[in-house]
C-alpha cells in the first residue's frame, strides 16, 4: 500500500497521481491493482476541469491494468491549484517482496531512463517565461515538456525486465532530491555506503538545457521516471542487455560498499538538502 500527493504539473495531475503511486508499489516487487484518489480543488474550478482530472485518472489506471475503486472530491479553501492525493494498493508478484535490506556490499547500482525526467518537464511548464528569457526556443521547451510522454515517468516497463533476475535485490524510484538523494536513500536503507561514477549517469539533452538555463543541478532535480536497481554483479551485463533489447537506456553507475556510516558518500559526491525544483520555485516567488 502506498499514498502520495501530487502538487505540480496540474495539467497532467491525474496521470501523475496514478504513475507516481504505482511506481512505489512496483519498486517493492508488487503489481499495482487498486487505486483511490482524493481530489482537492480550488474555488472557481469548473466542471470541465474536474472532468479532465478524472478522465486522466481513468485512462492512466486502465493503461496499467489498475482499477479505480473510490476516493473523494471537494472544492476547498486556500488552494491556488488542484491537489490529488492517491492511494495505490497492489499484490506482491512471484519474485517476492523487494527490500533494500536484502542488498550486499558489492551489489551494483543500475540506473534506467536518465535523471530528472519529471523535474525537467515540470520546469518546462512552470518556468517557460524564464527559459525563453534565458535563450531556449519554444521547440526546446516543448521537447522538455514532452518528456512526460516519452519516456514518461512510469518505471513499470523497466521493472518488469529486472523482475526476471534472481540477482535483483531492490528497486527504488528517486523523486524529491534527485538521483543523488535516491542513491543515498537506497544505500542507507541497506545499511551500506556507496560509490558512484558521475560520468555514467545519463542526463538527457532536454534536462541539460533546462538546468543550464535556470542554473540548477540535474543531480538534485525531481527524478521520477528514473529507476534505481541493486543487482548482484554476476547478472548486471545480462540485465543491461535485456533492458537495451526493450529500448530502455540503462547503465551501471556505481556499487554499494561496506561502511561504518550507512549513509557514507565515499566519492565526495554532491548532496542536496532540498530538491532543485523547490529551490527554483522559492527563488521565483521571492523575485515576484
Image: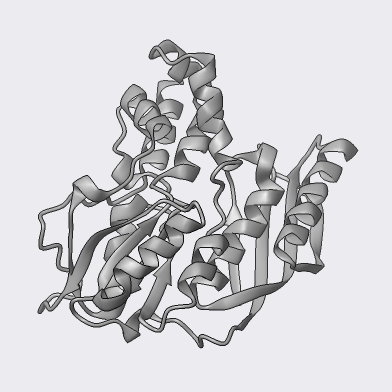
Residue 83 shows up from this direction: no
Left or right of 15, for residue 222: left
Residue 261 percent coordinates (x, y): 13, 75
Residue 61 shows up from this direction: yes
Left or right of 40, for residue 224: left
Tell me the residue at 74%/68% (across/down): 66
Residue that lies at the very extreme toward the right in this rendered image: 47
Coloration mode: one colour
Q: Looking at the image, is 163 positioned above or below residue 199?
A: below
Residue 71 percent coordinates (x, y): 79, 65
Residue 212 found in image quarter: top left
Q: Looking at the image, is 42 positioned above or below residue 179?
A: above
Tell me the residue at 45%/18% (across/down): 130
Residue 113 percent coordinates (x, y): 43, 50
Q: Looking at the image, is 163 positioned above or below residue 201?
A: below
Q: Nearer the viewer, residue 171 or 161?
A: 161
Left or right of 224, for residue 269: left
Left or right of 202, for residue 143: right
Residue 148 percent coordinates (x, y): 58, 41
Tell me the residue at 33%/63% (across/down): 110
Residue 39 found in image quarter: bottom right
Tell me the residue at 56%/61% (across/down): 157
Figure quadrant of the N terminus: bottom right
Q: How many marks?
A: 0
Amino acid at each position: 500500500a502506498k499514498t502520495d500527493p501530487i502538487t505540480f504539473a496540474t495539467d497532467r495531475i491525474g496521470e501523475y497521481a496514478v504513475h507516481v503511486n504505482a511506481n512505489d508499489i512496483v519498486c517493492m516487487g508488487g503489481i499495482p491493482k487498486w487505486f483511490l484518489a482524493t481530489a482537492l480543488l480550488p474555488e472557481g474550478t469548473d466542471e470541465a476541469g474536474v472532468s479532465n482530472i478524472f478522465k486522466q485518472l481513468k485512462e492512466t489506471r486502465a493503461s496499467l491494468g489498475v482499477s479505480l475503486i473510490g476516493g473523494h472530491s471537494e472544492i476547498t479553501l486556500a488552494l491556488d491549484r488542484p491537489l490529488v492525493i492517491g492511494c495505490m494498493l497492489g499484490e506482491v508478484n512471484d519474485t517476492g517482496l523487494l527490500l533494500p535490506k536484502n542488498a550486499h556490499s558489492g551489489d551494483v547500482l543500475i540506473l534506467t531512463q536518465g535523471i530528472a525526467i519529471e523535474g525537467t518537464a515540470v520546469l518546462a511548464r512552470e518556468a517557460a517565461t524564464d527559459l525563453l528569457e534565458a535563450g531556449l526556443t519554444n521547440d526546446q521547451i516543448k521537447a522538455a515538456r514532452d518528456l512526460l510522454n516519452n519516456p514518461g515517468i512510469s518505471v513499470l516497463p523497466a521493472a518488469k525486465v529486472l523482475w526476471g533476475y534472481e540477482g535483483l535485490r531492490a528497486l527504488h524510484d528517486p523523486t524529491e532530491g534527485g538521483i543523488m538523494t535516491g542513491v543515498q536513500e537506497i544505500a542507507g536503507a541497506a545499511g551500506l555506503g556507496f560509490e558512484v561514477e558521475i560520468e555514467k549517469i545519463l542526463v538527457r539533452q532536454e534536462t541539460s538545457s533546462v538546468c543550464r538555463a535556470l542554473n540548477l543541478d540535474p543531480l538534485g532535480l525531481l527524478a521520477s521516471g528514473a529507476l534505481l536497481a541493486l543487482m548482484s554483479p554476476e547478472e548486471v551485463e545480462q540485465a543491461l542487455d535485456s533492458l537495451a533489447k526493450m529500448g530502455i537506456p540503462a547503465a551501471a553507475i556505481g556499487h554499494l560498499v561496506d561502511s561504518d556510516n550507512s549513509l557514507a558518500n565515499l566519492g565526495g559526491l554532491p548532496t542536496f538538502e532540498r530538491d532543485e525544483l523547490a529551490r527554483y520555485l522559492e527563488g521565483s516567488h521571492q523575485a515576484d
